[in-house]
Image (cartoon, rainbow, N blue to C red):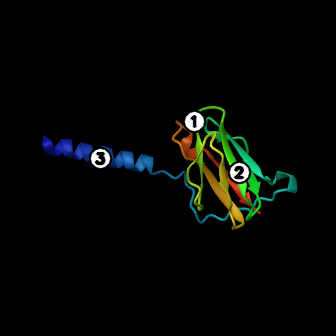
Amino acid sequence: MKKWLVLSLVFAMVSILIACGSDNGKTSNEPETPIQVSEDEIASGTLEIVASNWKFDKEYYAIRAGEAIELNVNSIEGVHGIEIMNTEYNNIVNDKPTQITITEPGTYEIRCSVPCGQGHRTMITKLVVV
C-alpha cells in the first residue's frame, strides 16, 4: 500500500514540474527581426511603462544607449513590476521611479516581475536600445 502511495506522489510531483516548466516553445537562440524605431518613439528623460492585467500598453519601448532615463511603471489594473532581461534592472516596481542607463544597443525583453495571475507568464514586451 505504501509503495503505491509513494509512486502516486512521485508521479504527481513530476507532472507538476513538467507543467510549470513549459516555455511555450520559444528558444533563446531563435533569430529575432530587429525592431526599427523612429526618432519620435525614442524616450528622452523619462519613460513610462503602463501595465494592466497581463499586458503592457506598447509592444516595445525605445531609449538611447548610454542615456540616463527615469523609468516609471504605472499599474492601472492589478499590481505589476518589471525586470529587464540581461541587465541589472530586475525589480522595478510600480510607482517607484528608477534611474536606468543601458549602454549596449540591442533589444531587451521586459517581463512582469510580480506574479499577477493567469496571464503572468505571457506578460512580455521589449525595450529597444538604439
Q: CA distance from mark 2 to mark 1?
A: 20 Å
* Point 61% across, 38% down: residue: 54
Q: Residue furthest left?
A: 1
Residue located beneath label 3 in the image: 11
Q: CA distance from mark 3 to mark 1?
A: 34 Å
Q: Which mark is residue 70?
A: 2
Quick one: 25 or 70, which is closer to the camera? 70
* Point 66% across, 65% down: residue: 31
Q: CA distance from mark 2 to mark 3?
A: 48 Å
Instruction: Indicate which disc, 2 or 1, sits on the residue closer to the N terminus.
Output: 2
Instruction: Indicate which disc, 2 or 3, sits on the residue closer to the N terminus.
Output: 3
Quick one: 49 or 24, which is closer to the camera? 49
Residue located beneath label 1 in the image: 79
| Horizontal side of residue 116 vs 20, given as left or right | right
In the figure, residue 93 lies in which quadrant?
top right
Q: Name the mark nearer the viewer: 2 or 3.
A: 2
Q: Residues within 10 Å of mark 3 (few under 14, many from 20)?
A: few
Quick one: 36 or 7, which is closer to the camera? 36
Identify which amino acid the numbered label 2 is placed on: Glu
Q: Which mark is residue 126?
A: none
- The quarter of the picture where the C terminus appears is bottom right
From the top left corner, tell me how far across and down residue 99 is, in percent. Answer: 67, 53
Q: Residues within 10 Å of mark 1 (few under 14, many from 20)?
A: some
